[in-house]
Image (spheres, rainbow, N blue to C red):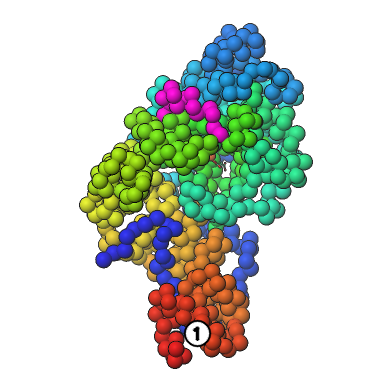
């Protein structure tokens, strides 16, 4: 019987080979651990090409004020402020040349932030209505297979701009907006300020980011792959004093005053600054999401936009076809509110970005809360409902874990068509159905059958709406028979829909399905194609598997160099299987001592193949002094985990 198809981090690697299984090969020069060659080599791989045009702004930009500038704007800030207090978006206001962002008004922070919520979120449709004429239509059309993987990403074109002054800085603010799908009457607005930070300052920031060794490689909470992020400013405090010395002045005199003004949020406070890097071999994507913890997000461009393709995108619809990329030059600031669905996909090249997460008050920063959602949720805003529900599901941002409450809020949001809420409901019901116990009981004593059926209903709603993550989860339901009759051909059909939409784990799963012949005739070269797509986006499991395919020449032309490259990428991201096999390659090329070192470390961490290999080293006296007692100790550990070769070796030792 085929093994269950489960998410990446639960999977056991399909292959591991051993020191003994390899014929000793000629000694080969070992690649340096981190060479430039890696990147160049990777760049030669198939990737969507067609360079994006380099013009930073389109001819469609309107000079001067927004087309619908209201009398309040003309009348100056006083009238505009009043307008803002009534809950208007405040888009038509002139900017004040103020010193210090906040002012010492006696207004209560959270009362102020409630106004700001309207401005930043659901009511910005009261602003200018200039249409985004040059941007792609979101009308659904049938696209050929592989379309999104082989077609250059489209760029978002800002079509309105106006001159602004933020303290000493004078420049333009460009504005865009998208209709919020599940709240028909409102829009989410976003802005770009070209050159807000001076070029020399940005160069220093980038140089500092490039040499930093503070990037975390622990796993992302969503996709379980290494984050490659680092925080120079965390929970309201500077952590990296060097970064502080470079950019604090601009944060205080440009970024924060702009945001406070734009969002009518005089107490807006910086919660975190983080740096993300997107390098070949590492994570190239952040799946589509909302920044649930931030009232406002600002992204500062660090890398030249000609050095990479893709980058930060917005995606107003569940479907990838509605995705367009922002062109962000070094020093440009792109600002959006919590209700903008967005993500990152870097197709080629190298990108660094610096992200500001801003809350609506210092109190919210200190208390780790997200108060701006509450009023909006009470008003029925689907994004706010979804976010508050998440907090009750996970017990985050000041809310206790309360599953029934989370479900009730998700259901209100899902009823409006919110695809994230629908997907999360599908997963909650699935978990409750599978685990039973307290979670199931708290959801109304439904039977396992009913819970799993509800799960599939919600997943289907989101999947049919075009949401890739839900399509993948529905595919897994069909593959494993959770709430539906087990059906591999349905599983592969839904997985394919997700994978066609650049969903990185789904692309890996398609590789698995073609390799195992599940729902499709087994096809090694189709499998390799999907693994490769996923690997190029940085998915470690796919990188490992692709390395192995190159080594064996399965489904693609055998290529030892590419094999080692992909194993190394996977290994750098923490894949124990890749480390084990990379060590085997070293052993094969005569570097047995180094191999034994790696195996020893992995073996101590419990990696079964490495335990076997280390045992063999002690048994043979290769890479370690011969020590039959140690050999038997490590081989026994591997054998106890069911490792056949280790059992055979033990038999040879007479144990
Ligand atoms: O790297 C970027 O430009 C933005 C990443 C992002 O969306 C996030 O960290 O939430
Ligand atoms: Fe984000």
Residue placed at 36% from the left, 45% from the top? 439
User: For ligand 1, which image quadrant applies?
Assistant: top right
Provide residue 123's location: percent of width, then percent of height.
49, 20
Provide residue 515's location: percent of width, then percent of height.
34, 64
Q: Quadrant of residue 82?
A: top right
| Looking at the image, residue 447 lies above or below residue 23 | above
Label 1 sits on a secondary structure element that is helix
**Which range is magenta?**
369-382
| Looking at the image, residue 50 lies above or below residue 615 | above
Residue 282 visible here: yes
Residue placed at 40% from the left, 67% from the top? 14
The extreme left residue here reads 485
Provide residue 115's location: percent of width, then percent of height.
55, 19
Residue placed at 51% from the left, 67% from the top? 576
Residue 453 visible here: no
Counting the numbered discs, the total is: 1
Mark 1 close to ligand 1, CB under 8 Å: no
| Looking at the image, residue 305 lies above or below residue 591 | above
> Does the magenta run of residues contain 44?
no
Q: Is residue 89 left or right of residue 484?
A: right
Residue placed at 24% from the left, 54% from the top? 486
Quadrant containing the C terminus is bottom left
> Does the magenta run of residues contain 374?
yes
Label 1: which residue?
A: 632
């Amino acid at each position: 019987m085929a093994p269950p198809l489960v998410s990446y981090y639960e999977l056991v690697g399909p292959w591991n080979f051993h020191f003994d299984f390899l014929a000793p090969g000629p000694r080969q020069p070992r690649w340096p651990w981190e060479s430039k060659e890696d990147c160049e080599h990777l760049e030669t791989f198939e990737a969507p090409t067609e360079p994006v045009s380099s013009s930073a702004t389109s001819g469609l930009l309107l000079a001067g004020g927004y087309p619908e500038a209201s009398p309040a704007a003309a009348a100056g800030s006083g009238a505009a402020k009043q307008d803002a207090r009534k809950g208007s978006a405040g888009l038509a206001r002139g900017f004040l040349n103020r010193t210090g962002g906040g002012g010492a008004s006696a207004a209560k922070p959270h009362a102020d932030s409630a106004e700001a919520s309207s401005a930043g979120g659901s009511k910005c449709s009261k602003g200018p209505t200039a249409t985004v004429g040059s941007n792609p239509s979101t009308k659904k059309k049938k696209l050929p297979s592989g379309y999104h993987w082989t077609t250059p990403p489209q760029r978002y074109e800002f079509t309105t701009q106006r001159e602004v002054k933020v303290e000493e800085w004078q420049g333009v603010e460009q504005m865009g907006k998208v209709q919020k799908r599940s709240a028909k009457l409102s829009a989410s607005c976003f802005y770009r300020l070209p050159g807000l930070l001076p070029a020399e300052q940005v160069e220093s920031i980038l140089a500092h980011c490039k040499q930093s060794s503070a990037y975390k490689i622990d796993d992302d909470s969503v996709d379980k792959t290494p984050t490659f992020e680092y925080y120079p400013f965390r929970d309201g405090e500077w952590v990296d004093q060097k970064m502080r010395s470079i950019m604090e002045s601009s944060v205080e005199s440009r970024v924060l005053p702009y945001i406070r003004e734009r969002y009518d949020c005089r107490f807006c406070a910086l919660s975190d600054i983080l740096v993300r890097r997107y390098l070949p071999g590492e994570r190239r994507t952040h799946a589509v999401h909302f920044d649930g913890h931030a009232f406002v997000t600002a992204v500062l461009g660090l890398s030249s936009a000609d050095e990479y393709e893709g980058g930060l995108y917005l995606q107003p619809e569940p479907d990838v076809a509605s995705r367009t990329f922002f062109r962000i030059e070094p020093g440009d600031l792109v600002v959006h509110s919590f209700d903008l669905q967005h993500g990152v996909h870097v197709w080629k090249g190298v990108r660094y970005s610096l992200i500001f997460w801003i809350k609506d008050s210092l109190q919210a920063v200190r208390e780790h809360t997200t108060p701006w959602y509450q009023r909006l949720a009470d008003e029925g805003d689907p994004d706010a409902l979804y976010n508050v529900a998440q907090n009750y599901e996970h017990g985050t941002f000041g809310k206790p874990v309360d599953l029934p409450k989370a479900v009730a809020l998700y259901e209100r949001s899902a009823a409006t068509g919110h695809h994230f809420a629908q997907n999360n409901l599908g997963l909650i019901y699935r978990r409750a159905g599978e685990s039973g116990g307290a979670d199931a009981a708290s959801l109304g004593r439904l039977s396992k059958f009913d819970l799993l059926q509800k799960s599939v209903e919600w997943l289907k709603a989101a999947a049919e709406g075009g949401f890739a993550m839900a399509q993948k989860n529905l595919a897994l339901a069909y593959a494993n028979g959770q709430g539906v009759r087990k059906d591999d051909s349905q599983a592969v059909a839904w997985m394919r829909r997700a994978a066609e939409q650049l969903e990185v784990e789904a692309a890996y799963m398609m590789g698995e399905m073609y390799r195992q012949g599940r729902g499709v005739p087994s096809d090694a070269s189709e499998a390799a194609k999907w693994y490769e797509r996923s690997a190029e986006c940085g998915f470690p499991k796919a990188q490992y598997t692709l390395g192995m395919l190159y080594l064996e020449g399965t489904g693609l032309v055998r290529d030892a160099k590419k094999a080692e490259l992909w194993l190394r990428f996977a290994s750098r991201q923490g894949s124990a299987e890749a480390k084990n096999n990379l060590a085997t390659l070293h052993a094969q090329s005569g570097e047995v001592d180094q191999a034994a070192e790696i195996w020893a470390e992995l073996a101590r961490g419990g990696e079964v193949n490495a335990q076997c290999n280390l045992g063999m080293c002690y048994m043979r006296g290769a890479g370690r002094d011969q020590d039959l007692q140690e050999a038997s100790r490590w081989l026994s550990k591997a054998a106890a985990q069911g490792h056949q070769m280790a059992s055979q070796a033990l038999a040879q030792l007479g144990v």
